[in-house]
Image (cartoon, rainbow, N blue to C red):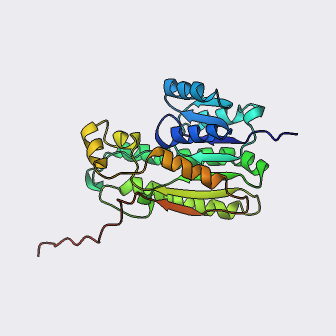
Amino acid sequence: MTSPAPTVFITGATSGFGQACARRFAAAGWQLVITGRRAERLEALAHELSAQTQVLPLVLDVRDRAAMQSAVDGLPPAFDRLRGLVNNAGLALGLSPAQTCDLDEWDTMVDTNVKGLMYATRMLLPRLIAHGSGASIVNVGSVAGKWPYAGGNVYGGTKAFVRQFSHNLRCDLAGTGVRVTDLEPGLCESEFTLVRFHGDQARYDSTYAGANPLQPHDIAETIFWLMTQPAHINVNSLEIMPVSQSWAGMAVQHQPQ
């Protein structure tokens, strides 16, 4: 008897890492549950990938707890037993120092990067636990969760949360067979940066000029690799950067006497 295709739930699938993940897992024959706020993009992706596998698109915002709960509760039987969760939905807004920040931008980052990830995780954990051995959660963190930089303030704080939340989940899930990884990408060229700079194409272009940055398909390939390791292997955290990126030296600011 043929085993059913594994199912992966991917948040933030309308662009960047999430979209690349959907394509990578579809190519391998996994069933997909994909979420996003932009209905037209999500439906187009679902239509594209439906030739390869079964796809369930869910138009929703991960910040909306009630919408997430309704969507999870309404998963049809064919998509009900998950093998994977990719907590990808997230964003950065601005690079202003804390003293001049826009508090609305801080709220949006916390609500999406922290609370949205929490909602998806808690609501889907029973299905992942029901799968048991080999089930995986990959939380998309960032090098910003470990390495500070000017203007990173709340964005870096939210990704530090992702890192520590992932490690604590490992403790809670001991004995269930469910694996958890905090994946920490560095410089990667995607729509993420256009969102951060409010559509400023010039700033986007200057960010990546000559850097040979990571690409979304690099991240998707890494996530697929993480989820398809033998069931007894857990990669707790994985930091990945382009060769062009490394760490800066410590800053010393000379203060007026």
The reply to whether residue 146 is in sight is: yes
Residue 206 drawn at (x, y percent): 26, 46
Residue 223 drawn at (x, y percent): 57, 51
The residue positioned farthest toward the bottom in the image shown: 257
**Corner quadrant of residue 2:** top right
Q: Is residue 135 left or right of residue 119?
A: right
The reply to whether residue 12 is in sight is: no
Residue name at image x 71 percent, y 52 percent: 135
Q: Is residue 166 left or right of residue 246?
A: right
**Corner quadrant of residue 69:** top right
Q: Quadrant of the C terminus?
A: bottom left
Residue 129 drawn at (x, y percent): 75, 51
Residue name at image x 35 percent, y 46 percent: 103
Residue name at image x 69 percent, y 61 percent: 172
Query: Residue 52 versus residue 138: which sits nearer the camera?
Result: 52
| In the depicted structure, whether residue 44 falls above or below residue 137 | above
